[in-house]
Image: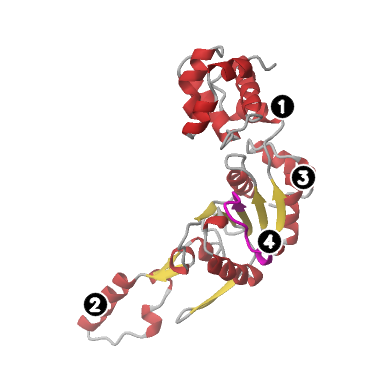
Amino acid sequence: MDPASIDETLVALSGQQYFASRELATGLFLALKMERPLFLEGEPGVGKTELAKAAAGVLGTQMLRLQCYEGLDTASALYEWDYPRQIMALRLAEAAGEQPSNDSLYKSEFLLKRPLLQALMPDPLNPTARRVLLIDEIDRADEPFEAFLLELLSDFQVSIPEYGTVCAERPPLVVMTSNRTREVHDALKRRCLYQWIGYPARDVELQIVAARAPEASVELQARAVAFVHRLRTLDLFKAPGVAETIDWCRALAALSVSELDPQSVQDTLGVLLKYQDDLTRVDAAEIAQCLAAPA
């Protein structure tokens, strides 16, 4: 069931271990209420994808994910026919002396449903729940795919030759994410409600880490979050996201590190930073300064 208010949305997301700002919870609430797609932008690792997963948990349904990439086409995103099975059915019919018709060859069992088409259909495990569709990293797809997506999201229906029109009984919750590797067309953005997700405040990130990496001690969590926040103030090619903070705490706990020290940070810095230039930038002196930041 959809949350009845913004406060209820915040509580429901917290129940899924997602600690959203009030602005983000408002965006999700309005996306459900107005039946509009929610467009999320922000740096990698700040929780854009996780919001869609949490929303699916709140609504009691499975999340459908369409991972975008250059060259993505409708066969991969929407549907295609299972030609080998159709040919087999055709040969079986001929062997039985029957004359197959289009109706027998173009039916649901031969239709390979991709995420966009599945989103228009009821959830087989919970038919009354609203479907949740994550269109991840739309900025990686080509512009013609954006145009196709805009048309589909306008009516939440699609016509399939030889099969008919599939129309959503209830519009799904569509969450689109972008890492801003390129600008997405204004027409698509205007169709959506927009939210920017930045790095969370320290106390919020500490809540997230406590929920997602409970194996780390409370003191270690606090010191790790303080270190990462200091790291983000440096001139890095790619600052660590929340996902990296969580992974780092888990890595430190796995190494039985109970207190941050220069050596343990140096040994595990590759969990936080993913580029050689950044690893070179954060030398021993910089690590010492970051460790001196108050927890």
User: Which of label 4 and label 2 is nearer to you?
Assistant: 4
Label 4 to label 2: alpha-carbon separation: 49 Å
Residue 207 belongs to the span the image colors magenta: no
Residue 33: x, y in percent?
Answer: 75, 57
Residue 227 quadrant: top right
Q: CA distance from mark 4 to mark 1?
A: 31 Å
Query: Mark 4 belongs to which amino acid?
Result: Lys
Is mark 4 in CB contact (under 8 Å) with mark 1?
no
Q: Residues within 10 Å of mark 2 (few under 14, many from 20)?
A: few
Q: Which residue is mark 3?
A: 23
Q: Which mark is residue 203?
A: 1
Marker disc for residue 189: 4
**Drawn side of residue 62 relative to residue 155, left or right:** left
Q: Which mark is residue 92?
A: 2
Query: Crowding near pointer 4: few (<14 within 10 Å), some, many (20+)?
Result: some
Gap in Å between the C-alphas at discs 2 and 3? 58 Å
Which residue is drawn at the image coordinates 64% and 63% (left, top)? 185
Magenta region: which residues? 177-188
Q: Nearer the viewer, mark 1 or mark 2?
A: 1
* Mark closer to the chain start, 4 or 1: 4
Q: Amino acid at mark 2?
A: Leu
